[in-house]
Image: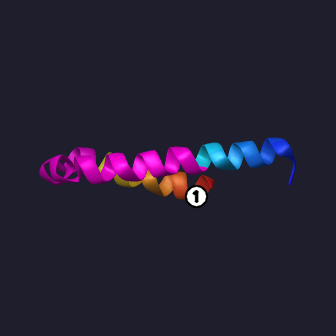
């Protein structure tokens, strides 16, 4: 792997960890709002597919 790929991987990992933390923090609020929940689920599936 090139230096750029390693840097990109580290950045993706940081973003992923931040997202996981954010999702855990807002899970209660998301549970109350189905529309937001659907958007989050779509976003997560897209994120997983792109990685």
- At x 23%, y 46%, the residue is 35
The one nearer the camera, 39 or 48, is 48
- At x 42%, y 47%, the residue is 19
Q: Residues within 10 Å of mark 1 (few under 14, many from 20)?
A: few
The one nearer the camera, 1 or 48, is 1
Where is residue 8? Give x, y as percent: 71, 43
Q: Is residue 7 left or right of residue 11?
A: right
Residue extent of the magenta highlight? 13-37
Where is residue 33? Give x, y as percent: 16, 47
Q: Which residue is mark 1?
A: 49
Q: Does residue 24 show up magenta in the picture?
A: yes
Q: Is residue 43 left or right of residue 13?
A: left
Kindly indicate the quadrant of the structure image that contains residue 48.
Answer: bottom right
Where is residue 29? Give x, y as percent: 16, 46
Question: Which secondary structure lies at badge 1?
Answer: helix
The one nearer the camera, 46 or 16, is 16
Visual colour scheme: rainbow
Q: State the count of labels.
A: 1
Is the C terminus in the top left, top right, bottom left or bottom right quadrant? bottom right
Q: Does residue 29 show up magenta in the picture?
A: yes
- At x 36%, y 55%, the residue is 41
């Amino acid at each position: 792997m090139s230096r750029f790929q390693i840097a990109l991987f580290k950045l993706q990992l940081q973003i992923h960890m931040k997202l996981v933390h954010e999702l855990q923090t807002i899970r209660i609020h998301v549970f109350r709002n189905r529309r937001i929940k659907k958007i989050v689920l779509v976003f997560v599936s897209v994120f997983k597919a792109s990685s």
